[in-house]
Amino acid sequence: LAKTTQPISMDSYEGQEVNITCSHNNIATNDYITWYQQFPSQGPRFIIQGYKTKVTNEVASLFIPADRKSSTLSLPRVSLSDTAVYYCLVVLSGSARQLTFGSGTQLTVLP
Amino acid sequence: DGGITQSPKYLFRKEGQNVTLSCEQNLNHDAMYWYRQDPGQGLRLIYYSQIVNDFQKGDIAEGYSVSREKKESFPLTVTSAQKNPTAFYLCASRGQGRERGNEQFFGPGTRLTVL
């Protein structure tokens, strides 16, 4: 199972773009990269997933280079309500076995 | 509305007692999961189930037990053998399909405190 490494914390200001990078050096061919957001005392919420290149949805973009050994979650124009913990997770598609989430990145958005 | 429910939201237990946490989903998902989260930490996998009547140990199964008699339900029992059970417990389910099947849906969690 691929291990992921993320920064422990990041600070940003309202209106800025935030990029959170995750490294997953031993990602396998059939693995997908997924990101979750968690607010205190709530369950994590799925944000985005990708396999390669770039994926964009209504809340974020995910950039994955060709070697897939890292990925970057991009949050455009963050607001105070984006303050949360963000988890990067590598998932073997079609397998129920889930990787441990790890400690994630605490993003704090300042006014 | 489809989703996952967990009950109770808060639970207090005396040392030496077993306690069961409920998790129900109406998403028609085959796979279900139990995680434990300690303050300032990430989620750790306790047990998971891919299908009815089948379940597998996760990373920290000692002191816990589960059952999966129905597709909709995956209760977790915290036994007296669990040395440090005070934590936030999260249940999740996962759908099917090559891409959407990678997304987990989480319940609101149960905060267990051992007195």
Image (cartoon, rainbow, N blue to C red):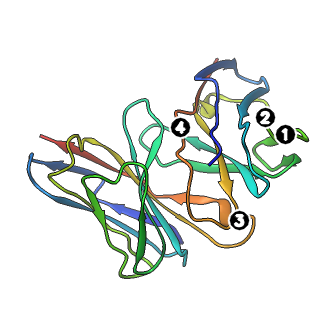
* Secondary structure of the residue carrying numbered label 2: strand
Q: Chain of mark 1?
A: A
* Secondary structure of the residue carrying numbered label 1: strand
Mark 2 vs mark 1, CA separation in Å: 8 Å
Bin the neighbour count of mark 3 within 10 Å (Cα to Cα): few under 14, some 14-19, many 20 and up.
few
* Residue B38 coordinates in the image, percent (x, y): 37, 36
Residue under pointer 1: A63
Q: Are marks 4 and 2 in contact (CB under 8 Å)?
A: no
Query: Please, is residue B38 above or below residue B90 in the view?
Result: above
What residue is at 80 percent from the left and 33 percent from the top? A76
Residue under pointer 4: A102
Mark 3 vs mark 4, CA separation in Å: 22 Å
**Quarter of image, res A110:** top right
Query: Please, is residue A45 above or below residue B68 in the view?
Result: above
Mark 4 vs mark 1, CA separation in Å: 20 Å
Kind of residue indicated by mark 2: Ser
User: Which is more toward the observer, A77 or B15?
Assistant: B15
Quadrant where the C terminus of chain A sits is top right
* Residue A105 coordinates in the image, percent (x, y): 60, 29
Q: Chain of mark 4?
A: A
Mark 2 vs mark 3, CA separation in Å: 21 Å
Which mark's residue is nearer the viewer, 3 or 4? 4
Residue under pointer 2: A74
Instruction: Establish whether labels 2 and 1 are both on one chain.
Output: yes
Bin the neighbour count of mark 4 within 10 Å (Cα to Cα): few under 14, some 14-19, many 20 and up.
some
What residue is at 60 percent from the left and 42 percent from the top? A37
